């Protein structure tokens, strides 16, 4: 399908510019300061969470009450709050995950290589036993697709506020990827400055250990680029003070630091750039996710990326297959192309239309026979009922709220 047709189809749907304007109106980052990262003791109602944090795109921390029943918080952690290495090695040792070297930088990223989990645990224990020496690498197991590797081990329950997750719902239908991760790293491991994939939301729960998060509200990242337009790798590095290299650094208005304790969950809104340090040996569960509250931000991001790609290869615009080439580069650089984004929207829309149909059939069943419209009492298909059963209650209220 031609790119312009895909854009039209997308923008007439949930990406309708009128709705985007309405959503933008409630996002206000100008008054954010450290005191405004809300702390929620118990997860309040979905609609409250939806209005206050998802729609407004504002961060918050949920207390450890929200994770205390999780199996991972019992099985993976010793009574002294340290990782239970014996249990972890015995149960998950054969799995393979990407391990980053936090003391190295290559092409503005920490170089990564795959390791078995058993090897990673061996390294981690010897690093602790040697008292984290300067001479040893600091290795960080990151973006490990734990749920994909151990689908029957229910390590955690997704908290209610994060359940409307279009991204994982879509990728589960494709059966080849997901955005559910486990991170494990020793004291001193860290994640360089970034915003999340496609500008999705993320949530991150500490199973044990503590993290320090540094946030910059959307827009501030422009002041953290060097004169060549490259985002700073480490927001704590002295190079930012070089006015010649970072001419806009002095314009930064808002930097928010917060410590996340064991058991707490942090919600990272769309497009908020952040840098993260493990202050102790730390294990966390992280999801990336997207829904009607941030899909416009993600779509804008994909569109901006395409424009950049088009500019970069503008000199060969006349060539056959130029559009397709741009889409290929987009997929490689951004993780998704226009065709896949459209497919994503179609799957999500179809699931929600089914939900609404079932909802209407149920509603009509509650009407008296005389009140019913002709044809409104047809039995929902097995497919519809299955879909309703699969969907969380949270999604119904969101569908109605964003429709
Ligand atoms: O915990 C980390 O090291 C990084 C986590 C992160 O960037 C995220 O959850 O978005
Ligand atoms: Fe992140």
Image (cartoon, helix red, strand yellow):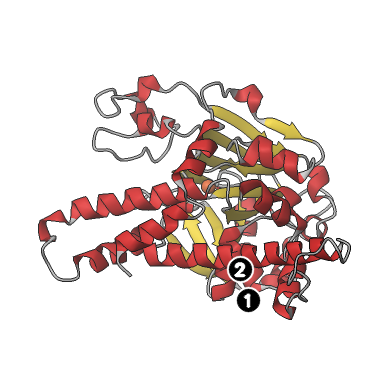
Q: Are marks 1 and 2 in contact (CB under 8 Å)?
A: yes
Give the labeled residue for mark 1. Answer: 94
Q: Which mark is residue 317?
A: none
Q: Residue at x 28, y 38 (%)?
A: 229
Q: Residue at x 30, y 66 (%)?
A: 2
Question: Which residue is nearer to you in this view: 133 or 12?
Answer: 12
Horizontally, is 189 left or right of 125 in the view? left
Give the labeled residue for mark 2. Answer: 117
Q: Can residue 325 be seen in the rendering of this structure?
A: yes
The disc, 1 or 2, on the residue closer to the chain's N-terminal end is: 1
Secondary structure under tag 1 reads loop
In the rendered view, tell whether residue 313 sits above or below residue 401: below
In the rendered view, tell whether residue 330 sits above or below residue 374: above
x, y percent for residue 354: 66, 68
**The N terminus appears in which quarter of the rendering?**
bottom left
Q: Can residue 260 be seen in the rendering of this structure?
A: no
Secondary structure under tag 2 reads helix
In the rendered view, tell whether residue 200 sits above or below residue 149: above
x, y percent for residue 105: 38, 49
Looking at the rendered structure, the number of numbered marks drawn on it comes to: 2
Distance from disc 1 to disc 2, alpha carbons, whole Å, reads 6 Å
| Quadrant assignment, res 276 | top right
Q: Residue at x 71, y 48 (%)?
A: 161
The residue furthest bottom is: 382
Question: Which residue is nearer to you in this view: 13 or 334?
Answer: 13
Horizontally, is 5 left or right of 392 in the view? left
x, y percent for residue 248: 32, 24
């Amino acid at each position: 399908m031609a790119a312009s047709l895909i854009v039209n189809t997308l923008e007439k749907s949930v990406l309708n510019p009128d709705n985007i304007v309405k959503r933008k109106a409630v996002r206000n980052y100008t008054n954010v300061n450290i005191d405004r990262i809300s702390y929620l003791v118990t997860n309040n109602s979905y609609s409250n969470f939806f209005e206050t944090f998802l729609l407004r795109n504002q961060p918050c921390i949920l207390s450890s009450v929200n994770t205390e029943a999780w199996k991972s918080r019992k099985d993976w952690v010793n009574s002294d709050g340290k990782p239970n290495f014996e249990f972890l090695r015995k149960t998950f040792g054969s799995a393979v995950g990407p391990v980053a070297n936090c003391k190295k930088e290559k092409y503005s990223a920490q170089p990564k290589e795959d390791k078995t989990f058993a090897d990673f645990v061996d390294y981690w224990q010897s690093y602790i036993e040697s008292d984290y020496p300067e001479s040893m690498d600091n290795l960080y197991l990151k973006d490990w697709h734990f749920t994909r590797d151990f689908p029957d081990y229910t390590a955690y329950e997704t908290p209610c506020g994060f359940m409307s997750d279009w991204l994982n719902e879509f990728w589960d239908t494709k059966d080849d990827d997901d955005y559910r991760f486990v991170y494990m790293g020793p004291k001193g491991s860290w994640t360089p400055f970034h915003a999340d994939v496609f500008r999705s939301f993320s949530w991150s729960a500490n199973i044990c250990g503590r993290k320090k998060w540094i946030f910059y509200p959307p827009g501030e990242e422009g002041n953290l680029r060097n004169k060549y337009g490259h985002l700073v790798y480490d927001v704590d590095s002295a190079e930012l003070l070089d006015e010649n290299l970072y001419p806009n650094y002095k314009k930064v208005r808002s930097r928010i630091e917060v410590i996340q304790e064991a058991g707490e969950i942090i919600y990272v809104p769309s497009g908020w750039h952040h840098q993260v340090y493990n202050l102790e040996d730390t294990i966390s569960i992280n999801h990336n996710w997207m829904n009607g509250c941030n899909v416009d931000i993600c779509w804008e991001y994909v569109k901006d990326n395409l424009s950049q790609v088009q500019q970069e290869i503008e000199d060969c615009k006349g060539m056959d297959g130029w559009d397709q080439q741009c889409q290929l580069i987009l997929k490689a650089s951004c993780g998704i192309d226009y065709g896949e984004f459209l497919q994503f929207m179609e799957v999500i829309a179809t699931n929600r239309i089914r939900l609404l149909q079932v909802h209407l059939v149920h509603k009509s069943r509650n009407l008296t026979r005389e009140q019913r419209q002709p044809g409104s009492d047809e039995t929902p298909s097995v497919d519809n009922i299955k879909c309703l059963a699969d969907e969380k209650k949270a999604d119904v209220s969101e569908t109605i709220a964003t429709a």
